[in-house]
Image (cartoon, grey):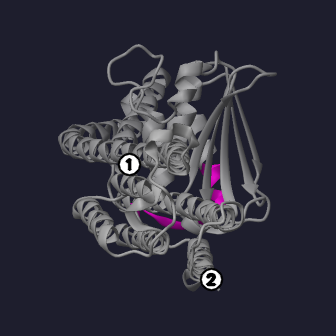
Amino acid sequence: MPLPRIAKSDDILRGSPRAADAAAGIKNLQQLIQLRWMAVMGQIFTIEVAHHSLRLTIPLVPMLLVVACLAVFNVVSLLRLRMGVAVRNVEVFLALLVDVAVLTTQLYLSGGTSNPFVFLYLLQIALGAILLRGAYIWTMVAITAVCFGALATYHLPLELPQDLHQGLSSLYVIGLLVCFVLNAILVVVFITRINLNLRERDARLAAARRRRVEEEHIVRMGLLASGAAHELGTPLSTLAVILGDWQHDAELMADPVLREDIDEMRTQVQRCKGIVSGILLSAGEARGEHSEQTTVCRFVDALAEEWRTTRPIPAFSYRNEFGDDTPMVSDTTLKQMAFNVLDNARDASPQWVELVISRDEASETPALCITVNDAGPGFAPGMLDHLGEPYQSTKQRPGSGLGLYLVMNVARTLGGSVSARNRAAEGGAQVSIRLPLAAIALPKAHRPA
C-alpha cells in the first residue's frame, strides 16, 4: 500500500530563512519596547526636573500627555509582541517613526533646536541603520532631517540661556553632556544587543544554507545510486539466476561443502541487492516503495532476525520492550536505516552488539525508539560535536562516513531525530533513533477490522 506523502526536510528548510528573520525581528521589537520604557521614564524625570527644580516655563500638561500616549503605544506593542507573529521591516520602520514623532513633539513644546536633547535624533538614525533595510534607512534619515529643520522655525520658546562660554556652569552645556551620555550608553547597550540578535539570525541562516547544501548532496548521491542500481541490477540478477539453477542441480547439491557455499553466495547476492536498494532509497528516493502493512513488533523482530542471519557476530543481544503492538507501514528505508547503525556498531565492536526497541511515551508525540549499543572504543569527542555531518568516520577508507549521515536525514524526513553518546560505565557507544509513531503508523482507515 502506498504511503501518504510526508513533507521532506527540503520543504522545511525553505522556511528556515523566514523563521530566522522572524525570530530576530521579535527580539529586536522587544529591545525597542525596553528602550521606549526607558524613554517614558526619562521624559517624566526630565520634565519633573525642568519644571520643579530648574523652574523652567514649559507646557507641563501637553508634555505629560505626549508621554502618556507613548506609554499606551508601548503597551500595544507589548501585546503585539506576545502574539508571536513575525515582525516585518515596515512594522519596525513605523515603530521608529512613532518614536521620532514623540521626540519631535516634545522638542516642539520645549524650545525646538535650542533644546540640547535635539541630538537624540542621532539615536533614532542609529537604530534605523541597524534594524532597517534599503530605502527605509534613507527615509528615516530624511524624515529626521526635515523634523530638525522644521523645529528650527516652529517651536515654543524655552527659557534656557545659551551661555556656552560658562562651560559646565551652563545649563545648556550640562544638557548637551547629559544628551551625549544618554546617546553613548543607549547606542552601546541596545545596538550591541540588536547586533547579537542579528548575528544569531545569520547563524540560523548559515545553518539552513548548510542543510540545503547537504540535501542537494543527497540528491546527487541519489542520482549516482540510481545509475549504480541500474548498472548492477543486471549482473546481480544473472548471478541470482545461476545460483538458483545450481540449487536445483542434484550433483552439486550432493556435495555438502558446495551446497553450503551456494547458499552463502545466494545470501550475499541478496544482501548486495538490498544494499543497493537501501542506498537508493536513503539517498532521496520517494518513501513508500516496497511498503507493506505490518506491526511494530513484527517489523523489528523480522529486522533483528534478518540482520542476525546475514551478519556473522559471536554475540548479538536483542530486546523488544515496545509493549502493546501498533499497526504500521514498513518499507526498505526504515530497515536500511536500522541496518546502517547496526553495521557501524559491528564494525566498531565485532564481538558484541545490542539492539533495544522501546516506546517513548514521555513526550507529547509517542515514538518508536531504536537503540544500538556496542562495546567498541566509542566516539571521539570531535565526532560527537559534528554528529550527522558527511564523511565523519574513523574507518580511514575513501567514501566512509555517510551511513550515519543518511540515517539522520531519513529520520529528519519522518520528523524524528538521531542522537549518539559514549557509554561511560559500560564502555562503547550508543546510537538512538527516535521516530514518531504518527509518521510510521498505519492510518486507521486502512487498518484491518
Please provide percent x and percent y for residue 274: 39, 43
- Horizontal side of residue 86 vs 128, given as left or right: right
Which residue is found at the position 56% from the left and 85% from the top? 445
- Residue 289 in sight here: no
Front-lying residue, 112 or 408: 112
Give, as a three-letter code, the residue at label 1.
Leu
Q: Secondary structure at mark 1?
A: helix
Please provide percent x and percent y for residue 270: 39, 40
Residue 291 magenta-highlighted: yes
Which residue is found at the position 20% from the left and 43% from the top? 234
* Residue density around tag 2, few if under 14, some if 14–19, many if 20 or more, within 10 Å: few
- Which residue is label 2 attached to? 61
Give, as a three-letter code, the residue at label 2.
Val
Please provide percent x and percent y for residue 108: 43, 73
Q: Secondary structure at mark 2?
A: helix
Which of disc 2 and disc 1 is earlier in sequence?
A: 2
- Horizontal side of residue 380 vs 368, given as left or right: left
Front-lying residue, 92 or 336: 92
Which residue is found at the position 37% from the left and 43% from the top? 206
- Which residue is label 1 attached to? 205
Please provide percent x and percent y for residue 328: 59, 67
Which residue is found at the position 49% from the left and 68% from the top? 158
- Residue 341 in sight here: yes
The relative height of residue 256 versus residue 327 in the rendered view (above or below) is above
Please give the label number shown on residue 102. none
- Picture quarter with the C terminus: bottom right
Front-lying residue, 169 or 20: 169
Quarter occupied by residue 73: bottom right
